Amino acid sequence: MSEAVKLTHNEDIKAAIPTVAGTIAATIADAGADHFSQDDYEFLKFHGVYQQDDRDLRKTAKKYIMMARASIPGGVMTAAQWMAFDDLAAQYGNQTLRITTRQGIQFHGVLKPNVRSLIQGINHSLLTTISACGDVRRNVMAPPTPAYTLARAQVLEDCRRVAQATRPQTRAYHAIWIEGVQLNLDDPENKNFSDPLYGKAYLPRKFKIAFAIPPVNDIDIFTNCIGFIAIAEDERLAGYNVAAGGGLGRSHGNIQTYPRLADVVGFLPPEKVVDVARAALTIHRDYGDRADRKHARFKYIVAERGPEWVRAEIEKRAGIRLEPARPFTFDTTGDLYGWREAVDGKWFLTIFVESGRVRDMEGRRLKTALRQIAEKFNDIEFRLSANQNVILANVIEEDRDAITELLTGHGVGSGHRQTTALHAAAMACPALPTCGLALAESERMLPGLIDRIEKLCEEAGLAGEEIVIRSTGCPNGCARPYLAEIGFVGKAPGRYQIWLGGDTGGTRLARLWKEVVKDADIESELRPALTRYANERFNRETFGDWCDRVLLNETTSGFSI
Ligand code: SRM
Ligand code: SF4
């Protein structure tokens, strides 16, 4: 990058305080302060914390609240960790646990005086908020379902190895949250700190890594900066195809930003997975755009320099020759609800969680039920799915009935059909009232909208059929709407873009169909499309495939990606 390029403010502050300590500890100690400074707002992200304000209250007052995100490789928690998180949400958060689309957990509504205790509690449970946010690699994902192939255990192990080998090393985290001390920023040791992997300025932006096991793409592998696609031969893990350059974030009206699916660039043996992950991450570190954060994602390096260049650079840095990619197919992105037998003869149960929000509601006391299960059955695992659901795994045959009974007693289903087909396949990002970037509602809006779309489906003769619907309150793409069969993307309060045409295997991007639709007009826009689909589709053709084949080739808004 030439000398004349003006770096972003984030780059300046990272270079000035490479420990990313900021003045966070001093502000925590200041009982009179209800929030952190603007620069600390940026540093806090490196510690897994977002400073937000309750947007429902904005008209009358500004109430600062914090969101803390735990990074949980592969989404696997012990029962004891689940109990600890349940306690922490009750004590310091808003009584809910929010399962994220990257298998993490978010605590919302945490007041500034409670953030340190919350993070201490998370660390005492042997989990962490480090590397959940900030210009570093984010939670490393792996398929949560403990079924079918023996290779699964090794894939999870590789996911954990990659997470460990790409974890930032700053001592600020321990100082602020565990010891409660403000680092002396003038101490040469702190001033000159350089992370062994990330260096002094970390990455230009976040970096996302995931693993998937075909034919199930339950973590949306192609939306990650680097994806490892497991290739199993005779139940044995032969290695991984590596996919580079996925990402979804975009901004309305800025065509330089766009969603992109990763390119498969080669195959590697399992023992090289850490080297390849670190190689790709350092390409982002060295070539990412530090002058424009909107353009600073790894996907733009791959798009602009080309997959061949990226492959050669990975090979050079990892000291490996990638073999040609091996064949694979993906046919679903969904979770398998209900009880299923795992490959080791134990059982697992996928429980539907609407928009990932674990809470008690009238008639469905999910949070209490999960808490009681964690208390009674200590050996089971709580696995978080990238579809925002929870999977109880490692269950012995003798405990199945008791767990089912406990859930039923709290109004929580455990069958293969726990809700309607549309609700079961949907996802929504949090948006209002917590997300500072939301332009429209999402999590609070989508369940009601799905009920309305279900009525349309009934009218069209499509009752009970699955269509993947996802919504976000802004174009950043947190619930991956650009891969949905129907994606709603917030434009302004009560107004959404509609994207159509994703496929069920998560291998094709949706296309923009309507630039802006008022919430009240969504039915009148979708009704003709659903009716035509019902009448014109080929045998077993999905709605996304039909839109891609027919509808989107007739009328598009003219926006192309
Ligand atoms: Fe996200 C920012 C929530 C997955 C792309 N995302 C945010 C913030 C932190 C808003 C902010 O910066 O102030 C949101 C917090 C809202 C709140 O109140 O909780 C937020 N993102 C989420 C979660 C919780 C959505 C969910 O429904 O679960 C997911 C947390 C995952 C985790 O545990 O790490 C989440 N975000 C994603 C994904 C999906 C994925 O990774 O598979 C994407 C699209 C993939 C990608 O990265 O391209 C995504 N989030 C973004 C972006 C756009 C980045 C870009 O390329 O420009 C932003 C905006 C930003 O970073 O400035 C963002
Ligand atoms: Fe917030 Fe937008 Fe992400 Fe939704 S998609 S959580 S509104 S940043």
Image (cartoon, grey):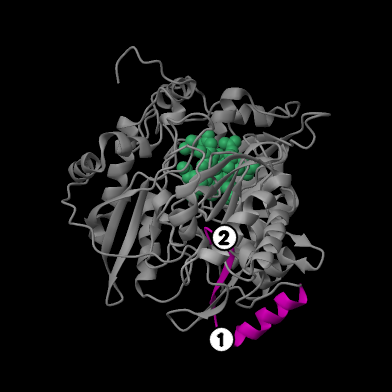
Residue 226, disc: none
User: Eyeballing the image, is 79 above or below 441?
Assistant: below
Q: Quadrant of the C terminus?
A: top left
Numbered badge on residue 397: 1
For image coordinates 54% across by 32% down, the residue present is 252
Q: Where is residue 88 in the image (x, y as percent from the top left)?
A: 69, 53
Q: Where is residue 373 in the image (x, y as percent from the top left)?
A: 67, 72
Residue lying at 65% horizontally and 43% vertically, measured from the top left: 431
Q: What element carries label 1?
A: helix
At x 27%, y 49%, the residue is 276
Magenta range is: 383-410
Q: Does the magenta stretch include residue 385?
A: yes
The quarter of the displayed image where residue 229 is located = bottom left
Question: In x, y percent, where is residue 364?
Answer: 76, 67
Disc 1 from disc 2: Cα separation: 47 Å
Quarter, ligand 2:
top right
- What amino acid is at disc 2? Arg
